[in-house]
Image (cartoon, rainbow, N blue to C red):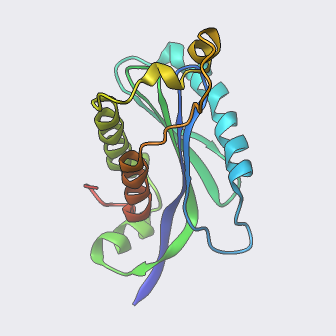
Amino acid sequence: MTTKTSSIACIGIIGKHNNPLHISLFPATGPSARDALSFSFLLSTSLDIFEARLPHKTVDQDFGLLQAVDERLAMYGWLTNTGVKFVIVVDMEGRDVERTAAIAAASAGGLREADLKPAFRALQSAYIGLLRNPFYDPDQHSPLIANAEHRVGSTQITSRAFIKEVQRIGENWIPGSSDL
């Protein structure tokens, strides 16, 4: 038996200077499927919310629900120690999946902020793995430093391993799952 459950529609990685480092889109169903530019604009709207909440944050990196975009999409945020922001846009109508006890319990109670913590932790682990790569220079992806040193290149993350891991996280996440 299949049922609908919430799914990730977009994962955005935003640099410490509020520059987009990576955006992954996941198949959206239905007539309200959005394109990459629309999600880029949505991710930009989250930056003001991060700034407004930042002085009030203490230890926890989880910013929780940033905003409900509409009746279908909701944005959740996470801040790393280095100032890099992870934003997950959740499609509440989601996708069809095989019904299991975990999914039945998660869909019955709706989406909780704690349901996204495993996804954020997995994203942070993937980002730490990227930073441990000796060939990855995070400053190369900063528009301020790149412009000051007249570097030519992308400010986007191009690591295939990192992008593949982000895709895996976005495709495999379901509410109520405790590991990714």
Counting from the top left corner in percent of width and height, residue 169 is at: 38, 55
Is there any visible trace of residue 89 in the rendered image?
Answer: no
**Foreground: 168 or 42?**
168
Q: Which quarter of the rendering shows the N terminus?
A: bottom left
For image coordinates 68% across by 43% down, the residue present is 40
Residue at 47% from the left image edge and 61% from the top image edge: 110
Could you tell me residue 121's position as x and y percent? 32, 41
Q: Position of residue 59 (x, y in %)?
A: 34, 20
Query: Which residue is drawn at the image coordinates 71% and 60% (left, top)?
Result: 34
**In the figure, residue 129 lies in which quadrant?**
top left
Classify 115 as above or below 84. below
Residue 55 vs 154, above or below: the answer is above
Whether 167 is drawn above or below 63: the answer is: below
Q: Residue furthest top?
A: 148
Residue at 54% across, 62% down:
26
Res 57 quadrant in image: top left
Q: Is residue 40 visible to us here? A: yes
Of the 4 image quadrants, the one containing the C terminus is bottom left
Q: Is residue 56 left or right of residue 137?
A: right
In percent of width and height, residue 124 lies at 34, 37
